[in-house]
Amino acid sequence: MKEKKVVFTGGGTGGHVFPLVSVIRNLKEQFPKQYGMKLYYIAPRNDIPDFDFTQEGLKTRHIFAGKIRRYIDPVSVILNLVDLIKTPIGIIQSIFHLFVISPDMIFSKGGYGSVPVVIAARLLKIPVILHESDAVPGLANKIVFRFATEVFVSFQDTKGVNPRKKFVVGNPIRRGVTGGTMKGAVERFRLTQEKPVILVMGGSQGSESINDTVLAILVQMLSDFEVIHQCGRKNIKRIKDETDAFLPDRLKKYYHPYSFFDEGQLRDAYAAASLVVSRAGAGSIFEILANHKPSILIPLPEAAQDHQRENAYRVAEVGAALVMEEENLTPHFFLEKIKSLFLPRTQLVQMRENTEHFARPEAGRILAAYIKEFLLQ
């Protein structure tokens, strides 16, 4: 049997990249050793480093891709005109790379970076398998749904997908972000274990609105809780400088700011947390669910197609999370909402139990199994 080749595509944010890592790792575990397999990644350069793929043994190729901005101002109009040129160039680049590689299939995670690759695959008649993370598909996936052989989704009622193509599997998560321990968290974050731990996450870039709200009530929060705060690479210096200046010495041991978590840090942070505060990207939501943690989800208002809001309310409907709209994210209301969940803890316990109804931690394994069967048929 000839060597099998798979091209992965999708990019723009960690929400596109990290699920690919999950599928790739599972595929390498499942694929029979007696058959050869080569894996490739084709997408534009973005803020998520390529080492996530090169460490997994993938050969990486970069292309141009255009991102459509749906807000109107002089700068966005100019950028859209530039990106209209990028997309055709990206399609030509993708045709060249796919012709040389000659893959057996394409697995697309979506995002604007995947559009040229999927269109090129269609022109070359290469099968495309696509995964949509969000309850409401982004514009990129809406464009390429018609080119996919199968469409796997995270949510049962994902909109805009042909029912004959749709399979519900959940969102693939990296196995390395589950299975943490309190012991590991205590050692890693130097937790005091004197108070319940709240994990605050603002996404891969860090949310300034969540960060600012936390800072406004941090003294009060630390009186009752210990806080692990992932605040984003661009925000970490400012936040450390500010908290060093205004936090009383007696409270500083309860506050643990980080720019970004690697897998080990994230795994143990989840293990320690009694409550998670997070944006509502599908990646974060399904990691929280897989770790069986109650959460307060704060949808990003500017998210395309309002998909974070739709994601959050799907989880809230089964009682696994509370949703707080950003327009209601005032410091006092936010603090009182957190405190109310701990007095008593009955609601937290029920939310933790309800995560079982939505968590699909085996999504990466299921998708890898499908790819394996497709390659070997």
Image (cartoon, rainbow, N blue to C red):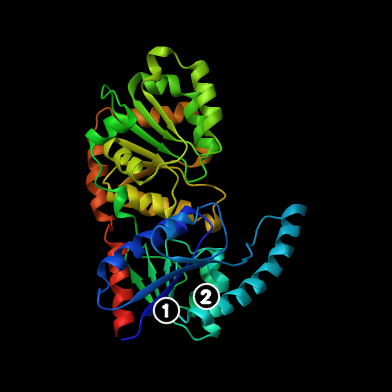
Q: Quadrant of residue 15?
A: bottom left
Residue 131 visible within the image = yes
Residue 43 lies left or right of residue 30; in this view the side is: right
Residue 73 visible within the image = no
Residue 208 lies left or right of residue 201; in this view the side is: right
Relative vertical location of residue 145 with respect to residue 203 in this rendering, above or below? below
**Residue flagged by tag 1: what amino acid is it?**
Met
Q: Which residue does the image show at 25% across and 73% down from the upper left?
A: 33
Relative depth, front residue between 177 and 63: 63
Q: CA distance from mark 1 to mark 2?
A: 10 Å
Q: Quadrant of residue 267?
A: top left
Residue 338 lies left or right of residue 356; in this view the side is: right
Q: Give residue 105's mark.
A: 1
Residue 86 rendering spot, x and y as whole percentages = 67, 67
Residue 370 rendering spot, x and y as whole percentages = 30, 74
Quadrant including the C terminus: bottom left
Q: Compare marks 1 and 2 and give the one earlier in the sequence.
A: 1
Relative vertical location of residue 126 with respect to residue 14 in this rendering, above or below? below
Relative vertical location of residue 301 with respect to residue 368 in this rendering, above or below? above
Count of numbered circles in the view: 2
